[in-house]
Image (spheres, rainbow, N blue to C red):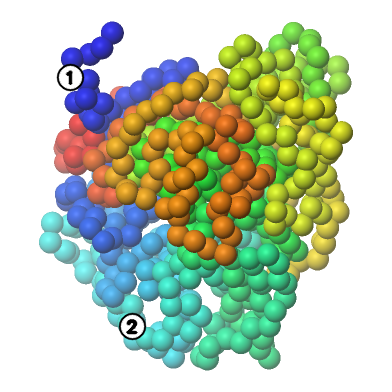
């Protein structure tokens, strides 16, 4: 039944939503922001980012939160759904002059209650290593060493309207010898206490070691490995210095990268619209994928490392199979660019069914990666049945989410009917065509995986020939860097799909370059894409970029407007979901059954305007 004033209702900001597992509720008293709670004027500022770390202290309240807003960086105790946020007492706050923080990452291996290592990337290209607990700045990278003494650090015991210490740091504009462009992503290498990787808007990535210096002269490089649209160089010097490696990937900005759960592979998304997946140790290209339109902005791995999801300027989320090196589904729910995608490892549904014919992938599961959560461990143990020979089949559903510049949160479910479409399908699936790729995508070296499919029967109205293959152990085992990389892949399960429905919606966009109405006739919109060396018209309809009608189109479980400004953060925690918008408000959404009564400080009154 149509609701009167439906248009207004559609634009109303939601404070709760319901999925199959129950009701998610916004917790206004658990909102984090600048101490004055005033919405930040985000005009011309870098995206707000959030990083978490658990210090494993004895108090049971070891979660810590870091976020950047404009030229400010905050470090708080994160109380989650248990207690209200106390914004008057940040553990550390820093205000930078001459540049802005753009991204940050904690080292979870070395974090203790007394010390934590936090990397911060900046708009002017520098990377800073700080300890917000000790309130120390230990090192600065991509800056001439002789100029580091020009840094100014002032500690003020009392500031206006704040009773906390604040570090005012001036990054003096001096010569940046490694890369002068904005830092887009910085992360510690999994399993390492000293190695970290930095991506820049120049399209370059650099591998650093915190124990080495950067030198006082510009580095000289020599080619280590080269392939289609990428090259890797080592730093040529008499003594070991930073950067250890320089990666040049694609064209335009390298917007984000993500390590696989076992730390062995690296997925990169670039402004040229390509996903590129590398073996990190052997620096070999494993596979590639092209967006339907425009640049790719975000990327994430499934908890078992078998699937990668991307989002970008085509308003789509795209699911890519790591084993088969191919697009297996797209999701359409956003009305503007997708800024963040993330899997939810705590909402994985496992169901046992009656014995039936099952001929899915028969690759052996590797050792499970310990996630440190009871729910995740329980799910993993149940998933071990999936390949057992004497147990009943296990059906698994993956959950992932996305947020975008349309201020909307979308949640998606994918199940085995999309991953293994050769199994018996429902009537609603008979009109969904699944492409029958018999060769690896262009740009893939084809050495890492075996992709059978040439012997498949002729395509049916719905294809039942999605190939399944096992990851090969072949390939170079030599490592180009020092430090141990975490091993073992966690085996969750597969993903779930809502039956594709042929619908045509006209949607308004906040970006002129984003693509809203998507159909099989929308290929003419590719003319809007800025031409690069890879002609989009030549990739469309290939395994690199299948047409819309060639892969299943997912619809979101929920699609809710939850903020006034574009969303920039989506993080799934055990008892809540964390989102953030460009106004500088970090919101906590309690999971079903996880919300208790909060003891709120007197100052924690109304929400700062992000959600009403």
For residue 556, side relative to residue 442 (left or right)? left
Name the residue carrying label 1: 5
Residue drawn 47% across the image and 39% down it: 522
Pick the quarter of the image with the C terminus.
Answer: top left
For residue 159, side relative to residue 525 (left or right)? left
Name the residue carrying label 2: 173
Residue 484 — which label?
none
Looking at the image, can residue 56 be seen?
Answer: no
Q: Is residue 240 above or below residue 73?
A: below
Q: Residues within 10 Å of mark 2 (few under 14, many from 20)?
A: few
User: How many labels were placed on the picture?
Assistant: 2
Query: Could you say which quadrant of the image residue 8 lies in?
Result: top left
Q: Horizontal and vertical percent for residue 408?
A: 34, 36
Residue drawn 59% across the image and 46% down it: 540
Query: Could you say which quadrant of the image residue 134 lies in?
Result: bottom left
> Between tags 1 and 2, which lies in front?
1
For residue 458, side relative to residue 213 (left or right)? right
Q: Is residue 423 above or below residue 287?
A: above
Q: Horizontal and vertical percent for residue 31?
A: 28, 40
Between residue 115 and residue 153, name the one nearer to us. Answer: 153
Q: Is residue 174 above or below residue 485?
A: below
Residue drawn 66% across the image and 71% down it: 231
Q: Residues within 10 Å of mark 1 (few under 14, many from 20)?
A: few
Pick the quarter of the image with the N terminus.
Answer: top left
Residue drawn 64% across the image and 67% down it: 230
């Amino acid at each position: 039944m149509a609701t009167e004033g439906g248009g207004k209702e559609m634009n109303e900001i939601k404070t709760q939503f319901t999925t199959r597992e129950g009701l998610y509720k916004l917790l206004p008293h658990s909102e984090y922001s600048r101490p004055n709670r005033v919405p930040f004027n985000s005009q011309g500022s870098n995206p707000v980012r959030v990083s978490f770390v658990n210090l494993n202290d004895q108090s049971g309240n070891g979660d810590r939160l870091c976020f950047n807003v404009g030229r400010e960086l905050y470090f708080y105790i994160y109380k989650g759904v248990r207690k209200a946020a106390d914004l008057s007492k940040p553990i550390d706050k820093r205000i930078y002059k001459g540049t802005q923080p753009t991204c940050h990452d904690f080292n979870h291996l070395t974090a203790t209650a007394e010390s934590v290592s936090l990397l911060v990337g900046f708009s002017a290209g520098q990377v800073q290593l700080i300890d917000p607990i000790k309130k120390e700045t230990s090192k600065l990278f991509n800056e001439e060493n002789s100029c580091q003494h020009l840094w100014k650090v002032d500690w003020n015991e009392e500031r206006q309207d704040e009773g906390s210490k604040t570090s005012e740091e001036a990054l003096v504009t001096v010569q940046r010898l490694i890369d002068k462009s904005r830092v887009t992503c910085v992360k510690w290498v999994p399993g390492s206490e000293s190695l970290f990787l930095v991506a820049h808007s120049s399209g370059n990535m650099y591998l650093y070691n915190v124990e080495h210096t950067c030198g006082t002269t510009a580095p000289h490089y020599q080619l280590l490995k080269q392939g289609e649209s990428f090259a890797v160089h080592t730093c040529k010097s008499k003594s070991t210095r930073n950067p250890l490696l320089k990666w040049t990937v694609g064209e335009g900005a390298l917007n984000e990268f993500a390590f696989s759960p076992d730390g062995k592979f690296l997925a990169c998304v670039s402004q040229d619209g390509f996903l590129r997946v590398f073996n990190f140790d052997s620096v070999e290209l494993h596979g590639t994928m092209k967006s339907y339109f425009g640049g790719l902005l975000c990327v994430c791995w499934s908890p078992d490392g078998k699937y990668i999801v991307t989002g970008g300027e085509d308003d789509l989320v795209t699911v890519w199979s790591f084993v088969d090196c191919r697009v297996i589904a797209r999701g359409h729910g956003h009305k503007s660019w997708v800024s963040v995608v993330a899997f939810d490892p705590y909402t994985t549904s496992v169901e046992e069914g009656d014995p039936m014919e099952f001929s899915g992938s028969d690759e052996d599961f590797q050792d499970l990666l310990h996630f440190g959560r009871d729910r995740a461990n329980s799910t993993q143990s149940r998933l071990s049945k999936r390949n057992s020979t004497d147990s009943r089949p296990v059906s698994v559903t993956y959950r992932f989410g996305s947020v975008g510049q349309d201020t909307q949160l979308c949640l998606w479910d994918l199940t085995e009917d999309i991953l293994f479409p050769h199994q018996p399908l429902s009537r609603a699936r008979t009109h969904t065509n699944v492409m029958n790729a018999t060769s690896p995508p262009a740009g893939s070296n084809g050495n890492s995986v075996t992709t059978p499919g040439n012997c498949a029967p002729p395509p049916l109205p719905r294809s039942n020939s999605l190939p399944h293959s096992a990851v090969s152990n072949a390939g170079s085992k030599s490592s180009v860097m020092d430090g141990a990389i975490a091993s073992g892949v966690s085996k969750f399960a597969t993903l779930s799909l809502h039956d594709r429905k042929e619908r045509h919606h006209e949607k308004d966009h906040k970006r002129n370059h984003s693509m809203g109405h998507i159909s099989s006739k929308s290929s003419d919109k590719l003319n809007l894409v800025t031409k690069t060396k890879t002609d989009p018209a030549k990739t469309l309809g290939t395994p690199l970029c299948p047409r819309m009608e060639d892969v299943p189109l997912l619809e979101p479980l929920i699609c809710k407007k939850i903020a006034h400004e574009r969303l920039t953060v989506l993080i799934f925690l055990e008892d809540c979901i964390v989102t953030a918008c460009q106004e500088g408000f970090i919101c906590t959404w309690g999971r079903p059954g996880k919300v208790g009564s909060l003891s709120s400080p007197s100052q924690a009154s109304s929400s700062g305007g992000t959600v009403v």
